[in-house]
Amino acid sequence: MVTMLAIWGMAFAGVFCLARAAVDFREKRYVLCALGLISGGIILLTPIPTHAVKIDLPTASNR
């Protein structure tokens, strides 16, 4: 089970990678910029498993 601390930690790591990529781009370190963008994107786009509950509602009868 994923805890809220893990979710916030992953979000922080992803945003940090993107911010670091912006700094690397300004300093013309394009390889590190690309690596930061890729790793930040992977971290932020990773699906988080949740516990979904499905509720079936009764259908309305035609009167």
Image (spheres, helix red, strand yellow):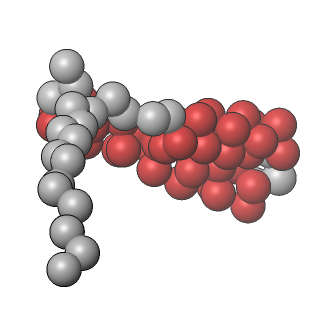
Does residue 27 appear left or right of residue 49 in this picture? right
Does residue 23 appear left or right of residue 48 in this picture? right
| x 83%, y 53%: residue | 28
Does residue 37 appear left or right of residue 31 in this picture? left
The residue closer to the viewer here, 36 or 38, is 38
Q: Residue furthest front?
A: 63
> In the image, residue 58 lies at what x, y percent?
16, 56
| x 69%, y 38%: residue | 38
State whether residue 46 is above or below residue 16. above
Image-quadrant location for residue 6: top left
> In the image, residue 19 lies at what x, y percent?
54, 54
State whether residue 40 appears in this view.
no
State whether residue 31 appears in this view.
yes
> In the image, residue 30 lies at what x, y percent?
84, 45
The residue closer to the viewer here, 26 or 18, is 18
The residue closer to the viewer here, 26 or 43, is 43
The residue closer to the viewer here, 8 or 23, is 8
| x 77%, y 42%: residue | 34
